[in-house]
Image (cartoon, grey):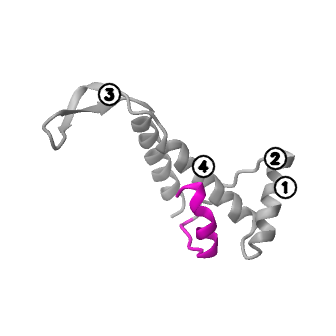
Amino acid sequence: MKASDLLNHWENEFGEPLTDASYELPLNIKDAARIEALAEMFPGCTRERLMRDLVSAALADLTSGFPYVAGDQVVAQDEDGDPIYEDVGPTPQFLKLTRKHLSSMQKGSH
């Protein structure tokens, strides 16, 4: 979800499973004021929900901007028959580590 989609998301709330882990962080005063403004604009959303959605949107935006770095190995061909090379940039490592931690968190919640 992109940050620009959050207003619509907050107006039409739906949820995903939550982890038992909690992350506490101090905010700078300007960001804290922005959270308070959003909480006032959307009184049905808790501050925690607002921050959780903002983190999710920021992570989606960040990871969608990871650069593609072509490796040496051809993994497919495009519609014109041109080679598509494996991605050796940060995306594969991030996805692998995300799956590792997701699996660990899912096993821990059962």
Q: Secondary structure at mark 4?
A: helix
Query: Could you tell which of marks 1 and 2 lies nearer the N-terminus?
Result: 2
Label 3 sits on what residue type? Ala
Spatial separation of the CA atoms under disc 1 and disc 3: 42 Å
Which of label 3 and label 2 is nearer to you?
3
Magenta-highlighted residues: 1-17
Spatial separation of the CA atoms under disc 1 and disc 2: 12 Å
Query: Could you tell which of marks 1 and 3 lies nearer the N-terminus?
Result: 1
Question: Is label 3 in contact with label 4 (beta carbons under 8 Å)?
Answer: no
Label drawn at residue 33: 1
Query: Could you tell which of marks 3 and 4 lies nearer the N-terminus?
Result: 4
Label 4 sits on what residue type? Ala
Q: Secondary structure at mark 1?
A: helix
Q: Secondary structure at mark 2?
A: loop
Residue closest to the far left: 81
Query: Could you tell which of marks 3 and 2 lies nearer the N-terminus?
Result: 2
Give the residue number, with chain letter if any, for mark 2.
Answer: 26
Give the residue number, with chain letter if any, for mark 4.
Answer: 58
Give the residue number, with chain letter if any, for mark 3.
Answer: 70
Question: Is label 3 in contact with label 2 (beta carbons under 8 Å)?
Answer: no
Question: Is label 1 in contact with label 2 (beta carbons under 8 Å)?
Answer: no
Reply yes or no: does residue 63 show up in magenta: no
Label 2 sits on what residue type? Pro
Q: Residue at x 74, y 72 (%)?
A: 42
